[in-house]
Image: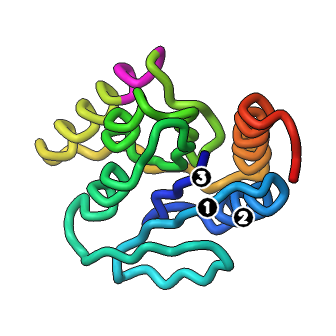
Amino acid sequence: MRIIIDGDACPQRVKEICEHAAKEYGVELIIVVDIDHYIVSDFQIIIVEQGRDSVDYKIVQIFKEGDILVTQDYGLASLVLAKASAVIHTAGFFINKNNIDSLLQSRYISERIRKQGGKTKGPSKRTKEQDENFRKCLYKVLNEKLGRKK
């Protein structure tokens, strides 16, 4: 089991929570970013060329059965969902087979509105509650799958 972070739009606090959990449980952590993002970490960083979905393609390529994905990208989540132990949104909720269709539909509708010149609401300012919800989700999966700390 590894934790793989879609690092391009991942909040710093989420990365810190993942790093702490990876150390605590002795789990491999991989952060995937494109060359436009500067990341410092004690864990593995994979840097890919800039390009639409280049990070997503790399994540799909390296993703293994039982890995945990941390992302805000519903399209990417849908591609690895069948193999994942869990897909956790950075806002602190699980993306799973029960909600992926509605999340993708929502994304599609917002995209259509924007293409027609309309405006859609962007993400709200990150809250401590989101950080705590994310931490709870991650630790829930680690406890269920590993049942122990390092």
* Near-viewer residue (43 or 87): 43
Residue at the outermost top position: 98
Q: Residue at x 57, y 34 (%)?
A: 86
The percent position of residue 30, horizontal first and vertical second, equals 54, 64
Q: CA distance from mark 2 to mark 3?
A: 9 Å
Q: Residue at x 51, y 74 (%)?
A: 45
Residue count near mark 2 (Cα–Cα under 10 Å), binned few <14, some 14–19, many ≥20 = many
Q: Residue at x 57, y 40 (%)?
A: 88
The tag on residue 29 is 1
Q: CA distance from mark 1 to mark 2?
A: 7 Å
The stretch drawn in magenta includes residue 101 = yes
The reply to whether the C-beta atoms of the residues labelled 1 and 2 are less than 8 Å apart is yes
Q: CA distance from mark 1 to mark 3?
A: 5 Å
> Under tag 1, what secondary structure?
strand
The stretch drawn in magenta includes residue 78 = no
Quarter containing the N terminus: top right
The residue stretch that appears in magenta:
98-103
The tag on residue 19 is 2
The percent position of residue 5, horizontal first and vertical second, equals 52, 57
Residue type marked 2? Glu
The colouring scheme, among rainbow, by chain, secondary structure or one colour, is rainbow
Residue type marked 1? Leu
The percent position of residue 102, horizontal first and vertical second, equals 38, 20
* Near-viewer residue (135 or 61): 61
Q: Mark 1 or 2, which is nearer the eye?
A: 1
Q: Which residue is mark 3?
A: 3
